[in-house]
Amino acid sequence: MTKKMTARQVRDTVEWLVVGGGIHGAYITRELLEAGVPQEDIVVVDSHGELLTSFRQKARACGMETLRSNYVQHIGPNPFGLQRFAEARNREEELASTRNSQPRPTVALFLDYADHVIERFELDRVVCERTVTGIERDGSLVVDTTAGTIRAERVVLAIGHGGRYRRPPWGRNVPRVEHVWDNTAHPTGTVNEGETVWVIGGGITAGQVATTIADCVERVTICTRHPLRKALREADPRWLNWNYIEDQLHSLPAGSSARLDRLKRARNDGTMPPYLLRELESLSNITVRQDSIDTVIRERDGLLVAPRQSRCENVDRVVLATGFEPIFEHPFVRSVVNSLSLACGHRNVPVLDDETLAWRTETGECSPVLVTGALAAGTVGPFAGNIPGARRASERIVGEYVTGNRLKRLA
């Protein structure tokens, strides 16, 4: 791998500053470089100092073995690049067959190909280990970080949820009640042989954790407020088509409750793909209980879980697979909104220019702050936080600001 930037190597002024080195940050950085932006005009600021670190940690922490997305979804430039990478290395068996869809890569294959792309495009050379603490406007954008200030003509917010996980009131500060993302270790390393474990949540993460630890604990109970629901993808595949996004989403006022409601209905949140449900049903020591928790009491030998509709039960451990707090309410996001007078709509959703993903100001102008990832959901649609969303956002940002080829009607 190439050598990342040190704090001393970062220029005081750059053309492009990308906040976040996850999948979205890596994707748009590659797109910018491919479009001809010189390396010295790009800086990626990430608190880990390396690309995809958070994704690697979360995939490991929940026991993810394969991606939900198929093999054409990755950070490389060619849709079939990952497939060819696998074939060239005799790793076709790591493309898991999927009914009614293209195969899905294993996490190991996906990450190895990502490392290949990172090395090929020398993406690590533009990454510096810092945390952005604020952004202000003084002609150009003034980006404050933990290692000094950088001026940038444009800033791309490619941030994740920033470690803000949903925790029910009864699950805060209770020993042996942990959120799945609290750990970076594989879940089999966070439980003990013979334990009884409750996993709270009914989505894909809950299913991954439960099936991963089933072989090394006595019993796993998945506690979910609704019956387990099946969905192969995060949303209907029609939402991958930009024309469909324009018709279904952009026809509604930007930032409106109507647009946010349509987006929420389109997302298959709290669902498990069919292949995971089949695995879960095949394991005899996993049970599913449709209920919610009133309280969890610490006892000398474990925990007493008190559900609302069924009997109390003594367990050894509770794992929360309850998702993230809303990105729109992230303290860093709110500070940027306030300092730059950016426009927000219903429930603080960013008001973006639907063609360029520029965040509009309160006066309606396009600011030099551009958005990709979950923050762009109001424009990019229900796949915004996923790999297809990284591609769609990058197409528009690079097409508008670098190549001059705006992609208004790309299917």
Image (cartoon, helix red, strand yellow):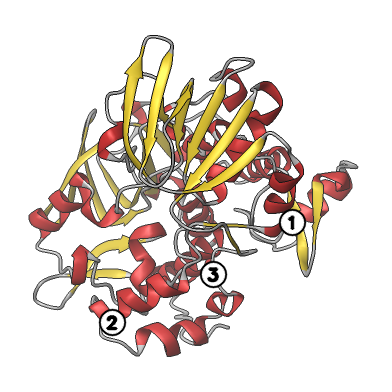
Q: Which residue is mark 2?
A: 258
Q: Which residue is mark 1?
A: 81
Q: Please state the horizontal and vertical placement of residue 304, each as a whole percent of the image.
A: 39, 25
In-image side of 87 versus 79 (left or right): right
In-image side of 117 versus 297 (left or right): right
Q: Residue at x 36, y 49 (%)?
A: 159
- Disc 2 to disc 1, C-alpha distance: 38 Å
Q: Quadrant of the C terminus?
A: bottom right
- Camera-nearest residue between 241 and 294: 294
Please name which of the two marks, 1 or 3, marks the residue nearer to the observer: 3
Work out whether mark 1 precedes mark 3 in sequence or the reverse, and give the earlier one. 1
Label 2: few (<14), some (14–19) or many (≥20) C-alpha neighbours in 10 Å: some
Label 1: few (<14), some (14–19) or many (≥20) C-alpha neighbours in 10 Å: some
Q: In the image as oriented, which residue stretches furthest toward the right?
A: 90
Label 3: few (<14), some (14–19) or many (≥20) C-alpha neighbours in 10 Å: some
- Camera-nearest residue between 288 and 53: 288
Asked which quadrant contains residue 166, the reply is top left
Q: Residue at x 37, y 9 (%)?
A: 300
Q: Which residue is mark 3?
A: 235
